[in-house]
Amino acid sequence: MSDSSGANALGVYGADIAHGGSITDYVLKKYPCRADPTDYTRLDIIRNAPLPAGDSTYNSYMITESLDNVRHKMQQLFTMGAN
C-alpha cells in the first residue's frame, strides 16, 4: 500500500507453499482511525488458514520505502528464493 504519490509505501512479503514457504494467504489492510483517518492506521498480517498441530514458524518481510523501491525489494526477495 502507498500514499497517492507513491513516495511512501509499505509492503509485506511472504513465500507461499508453491514457492517453498508456509504461507497460504496474507491479508494486509489499512484501517483508518475514526477520529482522524489521516493520523493512524492499523495493519494486520494474518495467516488465513488452519494451523497444523505443533510448533509452526513463518517468515515475513515488512518493507517500507517508495512504492517503486518496495516493489523492487519484494522482487529481489522472490528471486533470491526467500521463504
Image (spheres, rainbow, N blue to C red):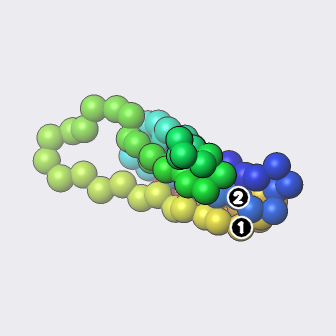
| Vertical order, 48 against 69 (above or below) | above
**Earlier-in-chain disc, 2 versus 1:** 2
The residue shown at (82%, 56%) is: 6
* Local SS, label 2: strand
Picture quadrant of residue 7: bottom right
Determine the secondary structure under disc 1. strand
- How many numbered tags mark residues here? 2
Category of crowding for the residue at label 1, using alpha-carbon neighbours closer than 10 angstroms: few (below 14), some (14–19), many (at least 20): some
Residue 52 x %, y %: 21, 39
Question: Residue type at mark 2?
Answer: Ala
The residue positioned 54% from the left and 51% from the top of the image is: 41
Whether residue 71 sits left or right of residue 53 in the image: it is right
Which numbered marker is on residue 4? none
Which residue occupies the foreground of this view, 61 or 53?
61
Alpha-carbon neighbours of circle 2 within 10 Å: few (<14), some, or many (≥20)?
some
Residue underneath mark 2:
9
> Residue 45 in the image: x percent, y percent?
45, 47
> In the rendered view, does 33 fall on the left or right side of 37?
left
Residue 72 visible, this orientation: no
Query: Looking at the image, which is closer to me, 20 or 25?
Result: 25
Give the residue at x 56% y 54%: 40
Q: Position of residue 42 (x, y in %)?
A: 49, 50
Amino acid type of the residue tagged 1 in the rendering:
Glu
The residue singled out by tag 1 in the image is 65
Q: Are marks 2 and 1 in contact (CB under 8 Å)?
A: yes
Q: Which residue of the protein is positioned furthest toward the left in this rendering?
A: 54
